[in-house]
Amino acid sequence: MKVCILMGSPRKQGNTNALLGPFRQELEGLGAETETVWLHALEIRPCTACRACQRDWTAFGCAQRDDVPTIFDKVLACDLIVLATPIYSWYCTPPMKALLDRLVYGMDKYYGAEKGPALWAGKALALLLTCGYRPERGCDLFEEGMRRYCKHAQLRFLGSHAERHLGYDVPFMDAEKEARTRAFARELWDAVQARMAQVKAQHKYHGRPLSENRDWVTGLVRCASCGTTLIFSKPHYWKCNNYVRGGCKTSQHISDEKLKGMILSRMRYDAEGAAPLSYSIVRSRPE
């Protein structure tokens, strides 16, 4: 189980990082692989709504050149996304808000001429928050916003855990806060493990027999992440065969029309060259 923790706090010795310590330790003790991404240390530009990302349904596709594509890859490869942030004025910190705007466009191909897929559909998301007000009055707006965000993006919202700081002259962490945070980490572990087992059981024999794969594209294109061939999925998409079985963490989706157009375009380009042209199809199985 891979956990991507997106850290919105600007302070490495702050309350949110103090809360994150036992949270991460509990997950790692259970067997999870965690990675913390400090957003304030990266260049994250705000979304400009140019919709360049909507032209390619298989990749992030953003026209801006900053650190967000790297974050995109980490998010797409994980099983659980954790947003860890202090609450400033009833919402997350600015770099996290900018990232959420960029991800909802780059991940969700809803905004072009034709509605496409959500590349991170089905992924789990949880919140780890700190605030100065009572959580039910200080974190409620951000939590509700993320519930709606997850519903729109086809993510699974697993819950939120928040702890309050009573004042600058009062120590933040204590044994009760640590115990509650560790319990929340165990709840997330159980929820994600149960979902992974469910997906594995559902897609154990998902692939179609070879005799049914009559399309000329079958076997020609492989997943960029795991190397498995793409299979056709109704109504008109190709996706990684290993992903639908739960074995690949990167969702590769491309429309049938676009994929065939790209292959034919490349073949025409090669045919116009001066060099002799030949193609060979090699089918192989992993050892």
Image (spheres, rainbow, N blue to C red):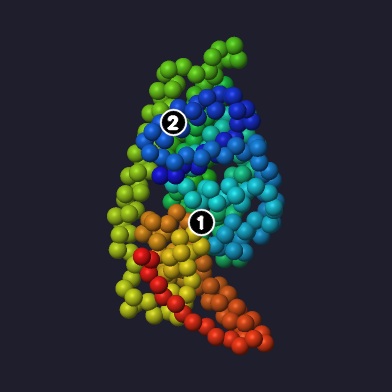
Residue that mark 1 sits on: 119
Amino acid at circle 2:
Gln
Residue that mark 2 sits on: 25
Residue that sits furthest to the top in the current view: 169
Amino acid at circle 1:
Leu
Location of the N terminus by quadrant is top left
Residue 90 seen anywhere in this rendered image of the structure: no
Residue 58 in percent (x, y) is at: 54, 62
Q: Write the residue at 66% across / 41% down.
A: 42
Residue 199 lies, with reference to residue 230, above or below; the image says above
Mark 2 or mark 1: name the one nearer the start of the chain: 2
* Left or right: 209, with 252 as reference point: left
Q: Write the residue at 43% across / 79% down.
A: 215
Q: Quadrant of residue 287?
A: bottom left
Q: Write the residue at 61% across / 61% down.
A: 54
Residue 121 lies, with reference to residue 277, above or below; the image says above
Residue 127 in percent (x, y) is at: 49, 35
* Of the pair 23 and 88, the residue shown nearer to us: 23
How busy is the neighbourhood of tag 1: few (under 14 within 10 Å), some, or many (20 plus)?
A: many
